[in-house]
Image (cartoon, helix red, strand yellow):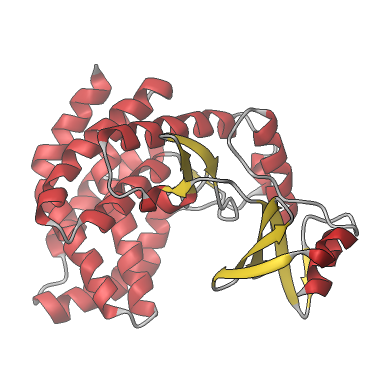
């Protein structure tokens, strides 16, 4: 891949390359370290490049994309598209050994500050719109209902009635702006208990800002769900997430009301995604998570609404 790396300058011809995961490499050039990533297409890379530079100027912990010698923030090589950016030293949040109150406070506060910055970006209309409700209704429900009927003997009728009866109008009132859309612990780099970097902005979209906070909550639940003790600690962590976020970027009462419902929609998308991939074990895990959160709603929702109403 020497020929590819030299598109960012001749000095990269001396770099060492180490595969990290599918489509991701660590690039070592002396004491300098970079990450090389494969992209499916160049679509939106310019917009991402401009956004990351702007966020960096706003003091956000972002690692911006690097220009090639051809003057683009991507390189084309053997019919593939690649981007390069400086490596952020630290540990991903999912490798810290557990989720503490301190972790969720730091993650939620960082997300709130990121959202405040994203809300001020003037070129937000350059990014596609992400309609979570529509995605869940048109794509996820048919797949998930059929799977639930086969495995559980029913098609989640009570949940569907709850969503259609309680969420449709509040969803339209939820604040919308640019969102990260992949804000999970693995994309948060920690050093000495603080977030030193936020990774993977290639999924930025215009959508409800509540999505990112709920996505973070479900990502944490997914990693602790197999442990009954840690699972029971999750509602308390959710309260810390909401309090810490709300302290930096106040939530609306509609967002507090919709929080649990947005988690349902996210879980429906995950279940459908894994069913599409033929990964039924992961689909069933996310279905179990969905049903478990549904059982917590009567406790969790009024607690959340009370936190935001203070």
Q: Is residue 51 left or right of residue 9?
A: left
Q: Residue 19, percent across and down?
A: 59, 71
| For residue 134, above or below residue 283 | above
* Res 287 → quadrant: bottom left
Residue most extreme to the top: 310
* Image quarter of the N terminus: bottom right
Q: Is residue 14 above or below residue 57?
A: below
Report whether 111 appears left or right of 162.
right
User: Can you give x and y, in whole percent of width and height, for residue 36 in the image?
Assistant: 67, 62
Please state which of residues 283 and 244 is positioned toward the viewer in this rendering. 244
Seen at 33% across and 37% down, the residue is 103
In this orientation, does residue 256 appear? Answer: no
Residue 22: image quadrant is bottom right
Q: Quadrant of the C terminus?
A: top left
Q: Quadrant of residue 225?
A: bottom left
- How far from the left and from the top, in percent, is residue 70? 90, 59
In this rendering, the count of numbered labels is: 0
**Residue at 41%, 54% in the rendered image:** 132
Query: Is residue 119 at all visible to an observer of this figure?
Result: yes
| 163 vs 19, nearest the viewer | 19
- Asked whether 191 or 279 is in front, the reply is 191
Q: Would you say 11 lies left or right of 199 here?
A: right
Residue displayed at 68% across by 68% down = 17
**Position in image of residue 206 (x %, y %):** 55, 46
Q: Tell me which residue sits at (14%, 32%) in the image.
A: 302
Left or right? Give the position of 304 relative to 76.
left
């Amino acid at each position: 891949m020497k020929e590819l790396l030299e598109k960012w300058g001749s000095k990269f011809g001396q770099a060492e390359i180490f595969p990290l995961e599918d489509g991701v490499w660590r690039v070592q050039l002396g004491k300098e370290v970079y990450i090389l990533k494969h992209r499916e297409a160049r679509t939106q890379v310019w917009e991402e490049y401009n956004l990351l530079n702007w966020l960096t100027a706003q003091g956000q912990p972002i690692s911006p994309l690097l220009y090639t010698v051809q003057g683009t923030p991507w390189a084309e090589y053997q019919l593939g598209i690649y981007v390069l950016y400086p490596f952020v030293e630290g540990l991903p949040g999912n490798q810290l050994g557990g989720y503490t109150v301190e972790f969720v406070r730091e993650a939620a506060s960082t997300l709130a500050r990121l959202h405040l910055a994203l809300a001020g970006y003037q070129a937000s209309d350059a990014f596609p719109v992400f309609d979570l409700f529509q995605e869940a209704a048109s794509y996820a429900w048919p797949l998930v209902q059929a799977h639930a009927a086969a495995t559980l003997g029913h098609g989640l009728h009570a949940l569907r009635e709850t969503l259609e009866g309680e969420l449709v109008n509040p969803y339209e009132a939820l604040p919308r702006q640019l969102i990260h859309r992949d804000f999970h612990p693995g994309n948060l780099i920690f050093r000495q208990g603080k977030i030193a970097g936020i990774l993977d902005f290639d999924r930025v979209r215009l959508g409800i800002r509540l999505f990112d906070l709920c996505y973070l909550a479900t990502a944490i639940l997914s990693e602790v769900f197999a442990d009954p003790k840690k699972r029971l600690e999750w509602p308390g962590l959710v309260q810390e997430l909401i309090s810490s976020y709300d302290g930096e970027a106040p939530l609306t009462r509609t967002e507090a009301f919709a929080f649990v419902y947005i988690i349902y929609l996210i879980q429906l998308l995950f279940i459908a995604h894994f069913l599409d991939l033929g990964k039924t074990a992961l689909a069933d895990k996310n279905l179990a998570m969905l049903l478990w959160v549904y059982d917590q709603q009567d406790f969790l929702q009024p607690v959340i609404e009370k936190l935001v109403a203070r």
